Amino acid sequence: MQKTAPLLLGACVAVPVAAQAADLSLTVEVPQLKVSEYHRPYVAMWLERPDNTVAGNLAVWYQLPKAGKENGEKWLKDMRQWWRRTGRELAMPVDGVTSATRPVGKHTMEFRNGAFPQGTLPAGQYVLKVEAAREVGGRELVSVPFQWPPAKAQKLTATGKSELGEIVVDLKP
């Protein structure tokens, strides 16, 4: 009998343990913009299946609540595709997923041995979605398709045109 591990991405389903043995590294670049009024972008990163259903959220960077300050949750809906697909169903903050906005530069997240914030990922085709929205700025969505788990080491890249810079997905079996 094959061992299974629970899938915690919205429903409880048995997943073969072998599907978990891989690493994913994600680098997202927040570009320097030459604008008169700069605000750090809100950024959401999630995984979708080929049928466009959400497999899980990887990260959401937004203005976290502070004493005496306005709560940034009300602008999460500006990341329109993420909001419609999964954001409006989440009770913020989400442990292991949400954190503060990031400054200009490259930011890397590591998901080792198939350990994603909301559970393991079954074998299959996926699309990494990275969406950014900025106050007094624009919106942008970048997609990177990939196979999980990877059969060989791969480096997949995509580049945004305005609100996002280079997106790099490093996959290792």
Image (cartoon, rainbow, N blue to C red):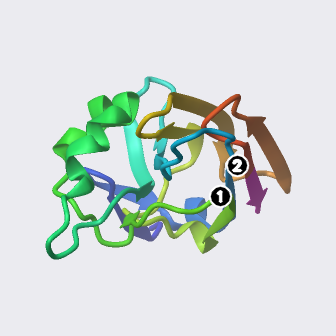
Residue under the image location 22 percent in, 67 percent down: 65
Q: Could you tell me the amino acid type at mark 1?
A: Val
Q: Could you say which is closer to the camera, residue 23 or residue 140?
A: 140
Residue ID for mark 1 = 104
Q: Quadrant of residue 126?
A: top right
* Amino acid bearing label 2: Gln
Position of residue 128 measured from the top left corner of the image (x, y, whole percent): 58, 41
- Circle 2 packing at 10 Å, graded few (<14), some (14-19), many (20+), is some
State the CA–CA distance, disc 2 to disc 1.
6 Å
**Element on which disc 1 rests:** loop
- Residue at left 19%, top 58%? 71
Q: In the rendered image of this protein, does residue 131 appear above or below residue 25?
A: above
Q: Residue at x 38, y 64 (%)?
A: 97
* Lateral position of residue 87 relative to residue 155, left or right: left
Q: Residues within 10 Å of mark 1 (few under 14, many from 20)?
A: some
Secondary structure of the residue carrying tag 2 is loop
Say which of 74 and 117 sits in front.
Answer: 74
**What label sits on residue 113 in the rendered view?**
none
Residues rendered magenta in the picture: 169-173
Position above or below: 97 against 154? below
Residue beneath disc 2: 32
Q: Is residue 76 visible?
A: yes
Q: Residue 93 in the image: x percent, y percent?
A: 24, 64
CB atoms at circles 2 and 1 under 8 Å apart? yes
Going from N to C along the chain, the mark reached first, 2 or 1, is 2
Instruction: Please tell me whether residue 171 belongs to the stretch shown in magenta.
Output: yes
